Amino acid sequence: DAKTTQPPSMDCAEGRAANLPCNHSTISGNEYVYWYRQIHSQGPQYIIHGLKNNETNEMASLIITEDRKSSTLILPHATLRDTAVYYCIVRTWGGKLIFGQGTELSVKP
Amino acid sequence: DTAVSQTPKYLVTQMGNDKSIKCEQNLGHDTMYWYKQDSKKFLKIMFSYNNKELIINETVPNRFSPKSPDKAHLNLHINSLELGDSAVYFCASSRVGQGGAEAFFGQGTRLTVV
């Protein structure tokens, strides 16, 4: 079973920041938080991951709370092409990614 | 160059047939996976191979048999196909053992059993 909880859906206006929350209250000290997205039944695409510190790359930023029980994925300037299902995943040792239901993000003009 | 490639992209077959899906990665990764995404869009891991050795085998009917001839390939053979096997199957690869390594997914094989 997935170890994360996400809202099933969210809307965001084009050009605005999209903030996608995730709860992972049972995360272990050596487990990473990963974010993937799946655009229209394509293969899931890696976005970003982190352990303790906040992370930023060309796609997004990841904010992890100090107690590591929750995190937020931030897409700073959402575009229509960011419409997708976003998965927050806690990665166990050995690389097994367990996908939950994810958040269906709709970016609207 | 496609990092993780699967063939075929679409597969329509009759119940009872045997079929294979092939997967190849050119990323030099040592671990490969098969995932199944059903009609409700849930993505579930089926198998994982590390250096040609099976390391994860979820509760999957033994009609499904993965085969890894080398580190770059992980094929999925399905015997006696059933209607419930209809789904999209995704192959993925990563470097295992390093917690920060991301997985790369193929574009999927849409299997329809009629």
Image (spheres, coloured by chain):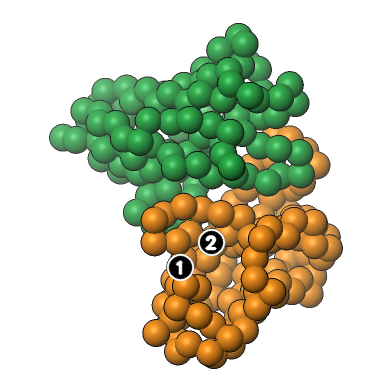
Say what amino acid the circle numbered 1 marks: Ala
Give the percent coordinates (x, y) of residue B62. Answer: 69, 74
**Residue beneath the point at 26% across and 23% down:** A16
Query: What is the quadrant of the C terminus of chain A in the image?
Result: top left
The residue at which mark 2 appears reads as B36
Which amino acid does the dot numbered 2 rest on? Lys
Residue ranking furthest to the left: A109
User: Image point 43% across, 39% down: which residue?
Assistant: A102
A9 lies left or right of B27: left
Q: What secondary structure is marked by label 2?
A: strand
| Residue B94 percent location from the top left of the image | 69, 50
Q: Which residue is mark 1?
A: B87
Above or below for B80 versus A85: below
Above or below, comparing residue A49 to residue B59 in the picture = above
**Chain appearing in green on the rendered image:** A
Q: Which of the two discs, 1 and 2, labels the residue nearer the N terminus?
A: 2
At numbered mark 1, what does the secondary structure look like: helix, strand or loop? strand
Residue A90 placement (x, y as % from top left) = 61, 33
Q: Nearer the viewer, residue A59 or B94?
A: B94
| Circles 1, 2 touching at the beta carbon (< 8 Å) | yes
Any part of residue B9 in sight: no
Q: Colour of chain B?
A: orange
Name the subunit of mark 2: B
Q: Residue at x 78, y 75 (%)?
A: B69
Q: Does residue B36 sit above or below A9 in this rendering?
A: below
Q: Nearer the viewer, residue B29 or A22?
A: A22
